[in-house]
Image (spheres, rainbow, N blue to C red):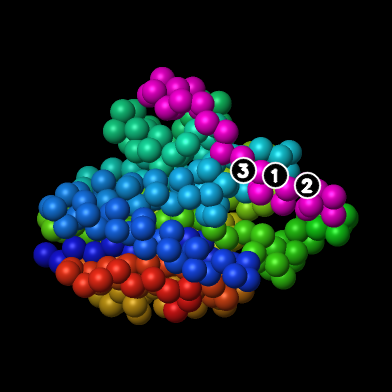
Amino acid sequence: MSIALIAHGGAGRWRPGSDEDALEGLRVAVEAGRAILARGGRSLDAVCATVVALEDNPIYNAGTGAVLNFDGYCELDACVMESRESRVGAVSGLQRVRNPILVARKVMEETDHVMLTGDGAQRFARVMGFPDHDPVTPERRADWFDKRNRIDEVLGEHAHKMRRFLKEHPEYAGGTVGAAAVDADGVLAAATSTGGVTLKMVGRVGDSPVPGAGNYASGRVAASATGTGEFVLRSLATRAIAERVEAGAGLAEAVEAVLARLGEAYDADVGLIAVDDRGLAVARHRTRDMPHAYFRGDAAVVALMRV
Ligand code: ASP
């Protein structure tokens, strides 16, 4: 069985001059996952190690360095899923924790539930021993002040202007992280973590913590989505990839078909990564950039800003 892991750093547009940092962060994160898979470890541990490395790197919109909501604080969403028994755990609206993906894993392993949200998720994280951590960085705070000062320009009279603004300035979203892997036993796992979108309404939950939308693992495919979550939620994009593969499509064909559908239906600014049970890894996106990195078997890690 061929091992493989692929990770993304968010669909959008990266600031000029930041490409190499984005790629280096992904290389380091994929190497962390690769080390686990190469010694016969589980895909679940590998995707978690990859996402933890990305959450701890403040240039990505997940964990430390996540974007702020309308009121100026982080609400973090994350989901982890393993193909074995379709085990899945998720958190949404988590405010003060360093690694939301590890809290999501605890939800999967230590509770009878799939998702915990808001105060309940926070309380659970403390009980599980995750210490208080403020994920807001000075850079994200400054960015938030700048956008709040131009709120009329950003929002105008109607909320649909926010959507248009995000479409014209996709660098405002992006930076979400995700990973998908298959281990030597053929078990697949996916993990996704995000701060959501800048200036989102307080309480807004995107696609990332929702199984089958932003994150999914079946017996054939593991996948993670990024971009404006409302489109991914409406199309259940990662589950749609799995359904196509289960119906006989190749992995690239399935990812491309789902992305094309997102384009036709919504002109959506999204990206997708996936691995299958044979160790194939695929990345596709409709945004200008989607930094991603992957490896297969014994081959070296490949890191790319766009496909
Ligand atoms: N999908 C994430 C969300 O909508 C954002 C992103 O991937 O950039 O919350």
What amino acid is at disc 3? Thr
| Magenta segment | 122-151
Image-based side of 266 in relation to 243, left or right: right
Q: Amino acid at mark 2?
A: Phe
- Residue 34 vs 245, above or below: the answer is above
The Cα atoms of the two marked residues, 3 and 2, are separated by 13 Å
Residue at the limit of the structure toward the top, as seen here? 127
Residue closest to the eye, 3 or 114 = 3
The location of residue 140, given as percent across then percent down, is 66, 48
Asked whether disc 2 touches disc 1, contact meaning CB atoms under 8 Å apart, the reply is: yes
Query: Could you say where residue 177 lies in the image, as x and y percent from the top left?
Result: 46, 55
User: Can you tell me whether the CB of the residue at mark 2 lies under 8 Å from the nearest atom of ligand 1?
Assistant: no
- Asked if the residue under mark 2 is in contact with the one under mark 3, i.e. CB atoms within 8 Å, the reply is no
Q: Nearer the viewer, residue 237 or 252?
A: 252
Q: Regarding mark 2 in the picture, which secondary structure is present there? A: helix
Give me the C-alpha separation between circle 2 and circle 1. Answer: 6 Å
* Residue at position x 28%, y 62% in the image: 5
Disc on res. 137: 3
Magenta stretch, overall SS: helix
40 or 113: nearer the viewer = 40
Residue at x 57% of width, y 66% of height:
18
Task: Tally the marks.
Answer: 3
Q: Quadrant of residue 124?
A: top left
Residue 140 within the segment the image draws in magenta = yes
Residue 145 numbered mark, or none? 2
Q: Nearer the viewer, mark 3 or mark 2?
A: 3
Q: Position of residue 40 (x, y in %)?
A: 13, 52
Figure quadrant of the N terminus:
bottom left
Q: Is the Cβ of the residue at disc 3 closer than 8 Å to that at disc 1?
A: yes
Magenta residue check for 156: no
Residue that mark 1 sits on: 141
